[in-house]
Amino acid sequence: MKKVQDMEHNWKIKYPRRNVYLMRNHNWAFSAWEIGRINKEIKPGAKLLHVDFHDDYSEPSQRLNEIETKEEAIRIAETLTITEFIKAAEKTGTIKEVFSIGDYEKPSDEICHSYTYNQFEYEYRKEFFRTEGQSFILDLDLDFFNLHAHRFIDNNHDNNPYRFSDEFIRKQLEFLKNYEDEWSLVSVCISPEHCGGSENAQQILEIFLDTFDLNNEDYIYW
């Protein structure tokens, strides 16, 4: 696997045996979910758990209908910003319900929001996993573990990281991995600029790969 500092903006891989899609930039999550639906890895109308320092819940500028091919999914994702992919997938019918974990200033009333994992665990976990026959997607942005991802902190873009400890990051990831049998698909974004730079993103990525037991898994480019 390439080092984070060498990844192009369209860099993305998949671990086929685990249905884990890993990408540099978050707009590609849209195509991961659409391709997952086309490949019958997930059903239409999935539930999404979005774990991210940002809510990424902006309205896309284009009209969207059901995506029918992998090529179309990738083409549309190329036109989306890194804040539009969730609502875009709602418009295609791939995502039906959105739950999120993140310290947002003004969370949308349209989603079930938790500020921390503990809040999700105690207030929303049972509700999230309650529906039978519905697909569950975990969407994780590694900038969730960088406290300086907040836009009001000076000189924070691609610089000035202040991340949680390795122990804390691993513990949070273990909580998410505990539901591995429930996740129909996992999408993970590296977001090096919002992790405070490539070096910090590389460190968090390595903890993720180790915690999710992916270091020895075969992967493909997509």
Image: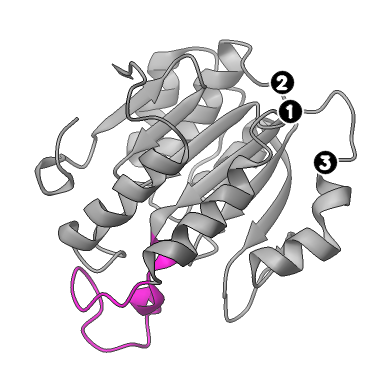
Which numbered disc covers residue 169? none
Q: Residues within 10 Å of mark 2 (few under 14, many from 20)?
A: many
Which numbered disc covers residue 135? 1
How far is disc 3 from disc 1 in space, using C-alphas? 9 Å
Percent coordinates x, y for residue 41 in the rendering: 61, 16
How far is disc 1 from disc 2 in space, using C-alphas? 6 Å
Residue for badge 3: 129
Q: Residue at x 64, y 33 (%)?
A: 180
| Left or right placement of residue 109 versus residue 141 in this view | right
Q: Are marks 3 and 2 in contact (CB under 8 Å)?
A: no
**What's under tag 1, amino acid-wise?**
Ser
Comparing labels 1 and 2, the label whose residue is closer to the camera: 1
Q: Are marks 1 and 2 in contact (CB under 8 Å)?
A: yes
Q: Residue at x 11, y 49 (%)?
A: 5
**What's under tag 2, amino acid-wise?**
Lys
Q: Is residue 205 above or below residue 199?
A: above
Comparing labels 3 and 1, the label whose residue is closer to the camera: 3
Percent coordinates x, y for residue 175 in the rendering: 63, 51
Quadrant of the image containing the C terminus? top left
| Left or right placement of residue 215 versus residue 55 in this view | left
| Secondary structure of residue under mark 2 | loop
Residue for badge 2: 43
The answer, for residue 58, to whether it is visible in the render is no
| Left or right placement of residue 69 versus residue 117 in this view | left
- Give the total of numbered labels: 3
Q: If you read the primary sequence from the N terminus, does the residue marked by circle 1 or circle 2 appear first?
A: 2
Q: Magenta part of the protein: which range?
A: 143-163
Q: If you read the primary sequence from the N terminus, does the residue marked by circle 3 or circle 1 appear first?
A: 3
Is residue 156 within the magenta segment? yes
